[in-house]
Image (cartoon, rainbow, N blue to C red):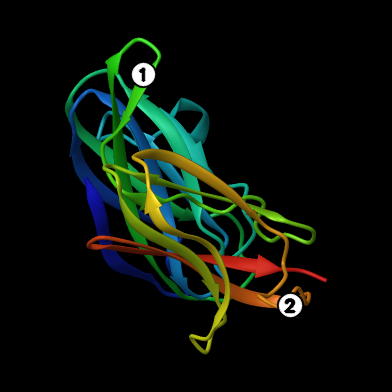
Amino acid sequence: MGLFGPFTFDGNTLMKLHEVYLPAGSYVIEVVSDAGQIDWGVSLWHDRGHVPGKSDALGASWAAPPGVDEAFAVTVPTAGYHAVAVWRVGMGGSNDGTYRLRFRAATTDAPGEPHVSATHLAVPRPNPFAGAANLSFSLATESDATLAVYDLRGARVRTLATGRQSAGEHAVRWDGRDEGGRAVAPGVYLVRLDAGATHDVAKLVRME
């Protein structure tokens, strides 16, 4: 599992197919939007040789606004090669863009005891946001970790979590304010998780 890409869309692209081998299990599949304002969609099918409609997919996501990451959770019942389709939901937004695919897996050691298999930053929700955004991250092991918000110039706007963190899931909320308690201007911000060798970034859009 991991992050693959970048891959590009141009003005003539409607869909791209990627072949992946997935063991049976539970996954989160994400399209990470690196550039552009394409309205992304992503779907997974077990049969790599035949891609039917969205309603027949094992899982899919296409509800986020243009230029924003998409993600969905899915259970793969049978190991094998699968088709991941990244597609354009509509023709609005820019004509080209760049994206990466992220695959995350989780296992269960015992009933009711989920085990995080990888350190990662989840997709912020809602995105865009007006009041507050829900941010979450997972740590595979106990470690020093920092979750912070940056502007597009790379200046740190707000530190949301820092220090020694336990293994597992962590959730915080950002109220759209900087370290001084001032509301930040509408625009695009970057949420960054630094934990050991992991440096994970997600875009977050603040609205008026």
Crowding at label 1, few (<14), some or many (≥20) Cα neighbours within 10 Å?
few
The residue indicated by pointer 2 is: 184
On screen, residue 158 versus residue 207, left or right, reads: left
How far apart are the alpha carbons under marks 1 and 2? 39 Å
* Amino acid type at image mark 2: Val
On screen, residue 200 versus residue 49, left or right, reads: right
The residue indicated by pointer 1 is: 113
Q: Which mark is drawn over residue 7?
A: none
**Residues at marks 1 and 2 touching, judged by CB atoms closer than 8 Å:** no
* Amino acid type at image mark 1: Glu
Residue closest to the far right: 208
Q: Position of residue 23 (x, y in %)?
A: 18, 28
Q: Position of residue 195 (x, y in %)?
A: 32, 59
16 is higher (above) or lower (below) than 38: above
123 is higher (above) or lower (below) than 11: above
Q: Nearer the viewer, residue 141 or 39?
A: 141
Residue at 58%, 74% (x, y): give it.
189
Q: Nearer the viewer, residue 127 or 163?
A: 163
The total of numbered circles placed on residues is 2
